[in-house]
Image (cartoon, rainbow, N blue to C red):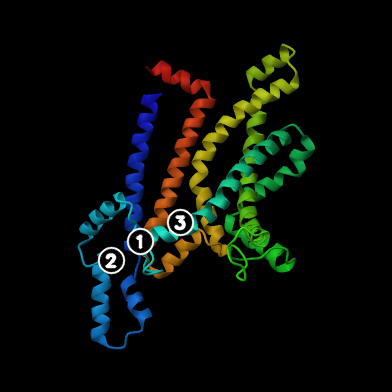
Amino acid sequence: MRQYFGRKVLIYALTFFAAVTINWMIPRFMPGDPISGMVARANVQQAEAAAAMRAHYENLFGFDQPVWQQYINFWGTLLRGDLGISIWAYPRPVSELLVAAVPYTLALLVPAILLSYWAGNRFGAFAARRKWLDNTILPIGYILTATPYMWVALLLAWLLAIVMGIFPVSHAYDFSLQPSWSWEFIGSLIGHWFLPFASLFLVMFGGWAIGMRNLIIFELEADYSNYLQALGAPRRLVRRYAYRNAVLPQLTGLALQLGTIVAGALVTEIVFSYPGIGFMILQAINSQDYFLLQGAFLFVVIGVLIANFIIDAVYTLVDPRTRSSLQGAQ
């Protein structure tokens, strides 16, 4: 097990290095110049003053150095825990902006992933045993899983916010309120959170339900299920074993889809102007804020890698065949 996880840590470390390097390169391939935008926003009329301001900002952000030197400086500051200063929200540090945005993104992702995974698997297993449910309600799952997150978000915003007026359509809470532990603020927070959460939940729910339904049907037709039935085992026991075996591929599917789920959350935040990492990435792109983009992408990369590592560990613990194969390899 130590050798197995040692190899996993090495693979994840190399993946982290490659992903962070690509994330550092992407903003610098974007057309335009962020310093020109800062000088333009300052509305300086004199050419000498504008040139002096430009030289000051280029020196401050390190843009007056060669690209290779900027890359080395990036890793040096990153290892010290310094993500730089935001160009969009100058002079606020990037770490301060991320600390304010990460809780909103986690408040969407964690409940949506866990609840959709649990509910989708349960519903798919139930639908595999009920023909009427399989033929009537489950096709909705095919529509949901084939629908982009953004379309579902727009549809819910139009129906529940604009037409019916049940939920607010944007931001994280009412602008007239100040963050506090009052029931009024908590209610506003939940009301603004529901539509982005529902958008993520519905799309993921459909995918898990369809996957579990197909896996349960396959497991119930496997040799061990037929053997248990021939021995007179109760149908409930056979289905329980089938569900346990079908959950294992779903764990692998969760690891493979985490990147897509995170990307869907970022797009959903943009649709609802929800102040999480996704909405911050949009602001950083519009302002060509290299450092904020690097910091936001860094959070996404670290989050996906940690989640995949946890799923690998859980898979090893819940599947005895994995442990047996590791022992056999030794």
Residue drawn at (32%, 45%) of the image: 17
Q: Secondary structure at mark 1?
A: helix
Residue 4 percent location from the top left of the image = 39, 27
Q: What kind of residue is marked 2?
A: Phe
The Cα–Cα distance between marks 2 and 3, rounded to whole angstroms, is 21 Å
Check disc 1 and give the amino acid type. Answer: Phe
Q: Which mark is residue 61?
A: 2
Q: CA distance from mark 1 to mark 3?
A: 15 Å
- The one nearer the camera, 54 or 247, is 54
**What secondary structure is marked by label 3?**
helix
Q: Which residue is mark 3?
A: 99
| Local crowd size for mark 3, using a 10 Å CA cut-off: few (<14), some (14–19), many (≥20) | few
- Residue ID at (49%, 40%): 256
Q: Could you say where residue 233 lies in the image, as x and y percent from the top left?
A: 73, 15
Task: Specify the amino acid type for callout 3.
Answer: Val
- Residue under the image location 69 percent in, 63 percent down: 167
Quarter location, residue 231: top right
Task: List x then y, in percent, for residue 183.
Answer: 68, 59
Do the residues under discs 2 and 1 have CB atoms within 8 angstroms? yes
Nearer to us in this view, 5 or 25: 5
State whether residue 277 appears in this view. Answer: no
- The label on residue 13 is none
